[in-house]
Image: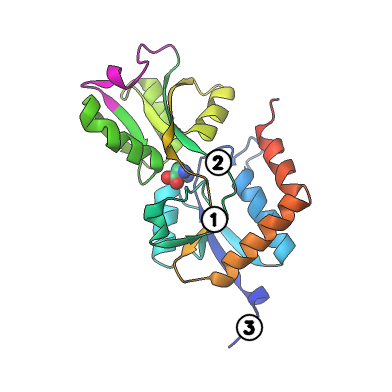
Amino acid sequence: EGGSASDKTYIIATDTTFAPFEFTNDKNEFVGIDVDILAAIAKDQGFKYELQSLGFDAAVAALESGQADGTIAGMSITEERQKKYDFSEAYYDSYVCMAVKKGSSIKGYEDLKGKKVAAKTGTQGADCAESLKDKYGFDITYFDDSATMYQDVKTGNTVACFEDQPVMAYGVSQGNGLEIVTEEKDNFSTPYGFAVLKGQNADLLKMFNEGLKNIKANGTYDEIVAKYTSAK
Ligand code: GLN
């Protein structure tokens, strides 16, 4: 039965703990830049959606299997992914960094020989770690979510983790007990986009792009970013 686009509730998949893009705040509300821009865009464009907080790798898998119509999860627009997904216009710049426990003697890749580092499955951070692994002689332990990954570095099982810089910088500013020691601005600099499966949900992608343009023009986008990133 051919309902109009506005009857449909789109399933949108996201990460679990990826502040300031998506996370549960101290009032137990699921919030963040991704969460708020999606809400503002849906309101602007008049579509309904259900946001499912699955974890990054699981969100991408849900998109791939058709269980989700779209993904917004601080997802980097990479050439590799563009073979499988259609991305919106970029909405946030990012790059990968390496962080260690605050005060650690690990200052850079040269210090990683024979050690274990942490990465999140399926992410650009993991790709970055994999690209350096053989040259610097370290092993990688994989995690499904950022919070557990940071905890592992603090506990000392792993000596460093690879994470998106805006996320790590936010975490450090909130006192997560880590510090950034290297930045990969050249090789792993990739902006975030909203993704749909290639050739699917073109209507949703179009609405996302239209809505993004509108919330940028009317100041909503800047307000949302400022709300989560301005120093408190
Ligand atoms: N931006 C990174 C990527 O797309 C990480 C995303 C995330 O962990 N939510 O691979």
Q: Secondary structure at mark 1?
A: loop
Going by the numbered disc 3, the residue's amino acid type is: Gly
Magenta stretch: dominant SS?
loop
Can you tell which quarter of the image residue 80 is in?
bottom left
Going by the numbered disc 1, the residue's amino acid type is: Phe
User: Relative to 168, does residue 207 appear above or below in the rendering?
Assistant: below
Mark nearer the N terminus (1 vs 2): 2
Q: Which residue is mark 3?
A: 3
Q: Residue at x 69, y 26 (%)?
A: 231
Q: Residue at x 28, y 32 (%)?
A: 132
Which residues lie in the magenta part? Answer: 103-116
User: Relative to 46, does residue 121 appear above or below in the rendering?
Assistant: above
Q: Secondary structure at mark 2?
A: loop
Q: Residue at x 48, y 49 (%)?
A: 75
Can you tell which quarter of the image residue 29 is in?
top right
Query: Dot 3, crowdedness within 10 Å: few (<14), some or many (≥20)?
Result: few
Residue 72 horizontal side relative to residue 118, left or right: right
Q: Which residue is mark 2?
A: 93
Q: Which residue is mark 1?
A: 194
Does the numbered disc 3 mark a residue whose Cβ is under 8 Å from ligand 1? no
Residue 72 horizontal side relative to residue 79, left or right: right
The quarter of the picture where the N terminus appears is: bottom right
Q: Position of residue 215 (x, y in %)?
A: 73, 53
Q: Nearer the viewer, mark 3 or mark 1?
A: 1
